[in-house]
Image (tube, rainbow, N blue to C red):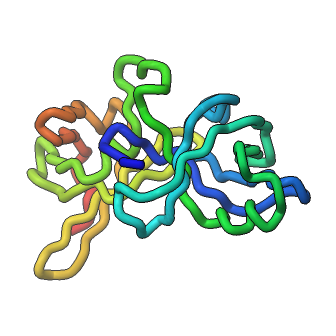
Amino acid sequence: MVVSDTWLTIGKVTGVHGLKGNLKVWSWAQSPDTFTQGLVVVLKNEDASPGTGREYVITQTGRYKKGVLLTLDGVNTREASEALVGKLVLVDKTNLPDLDEDTWYWEDLIGLTVVDTNEGELGKVEQLFPTGADDILVVTDKTSQGKQEVLIPMNAAFVKEINLDTRMITTELPEGFIPD
């Protein structure tokens, strides 16, 4: 099983449900409908190298609180499902619908350099997290004075361009947005 750069992390197994191998998954996908019956997913340890993991086929899905319930082919006991708790759930992007214009996978934004039109280079995107309004870019600059973190809303008022080819995000932040 080879996990290449076309594989996208879409969730994490957080627990088990019932006695027949159902998994509780915290979904990182914008829509729980990403998890569909018949979809091939890879489960792997968070700290494992990209080429590791095991393929499973989703046989049944359902919504569960803020996540989804998954039944995987071959995982049909509580003991088997407990062994998968903590694993990341990955899917091949080529099996997902095409993205709309001006939308990106979070994973594609991690590591991009952020350059502000007024402040210059701010650092690299370390992570993202959702809020009720806009997703937030967590931009970290590891300088000699420590680690500076800037939180930037993914909003057209602040983010002017995302270029995956040059691996750069251009922002235009208001004066005073970044503390001195």
Count of numbered circles on the image: 0
Q: Position of residue 34 (x, y in %)?
A: 60, 31
- Vertical placement of residue 26 versus 94, above or below: below
Q: Residue at x 42, y 32 (%)?
A: 93
Q: Is residue 129 left or right of residue 160?
A: right
Q: Residue at x 39, y 27 (%)?
A: 103
Q: Is residue 159 left or right of residue 25?
A: left
Q: Position of residue 24 (x, y in %)?
A: 74, 54
Most extreme residue toward the bottom, as rendered? 145
- Vertical placement of residue 78 versus 131, above or below: below
Q: Residue at x 43, y 42 (%)?
A: 8
Q: Quadrant of residue 143?
A: bottom left
Q: Position of residue 172 (x, y in %)?
A: 21, 40
Quadrant of the snapshot with the C terminus: bottom left
Q: Residue at x 60, y 43 (%)?
A: 132
Q: Is residue 177 left or right of residue 118?
A: right
- Vertical placement of residue 69 versus 18, above or below: above
Q: Position of residue 158 (x, y in %)?
A: 30, 38
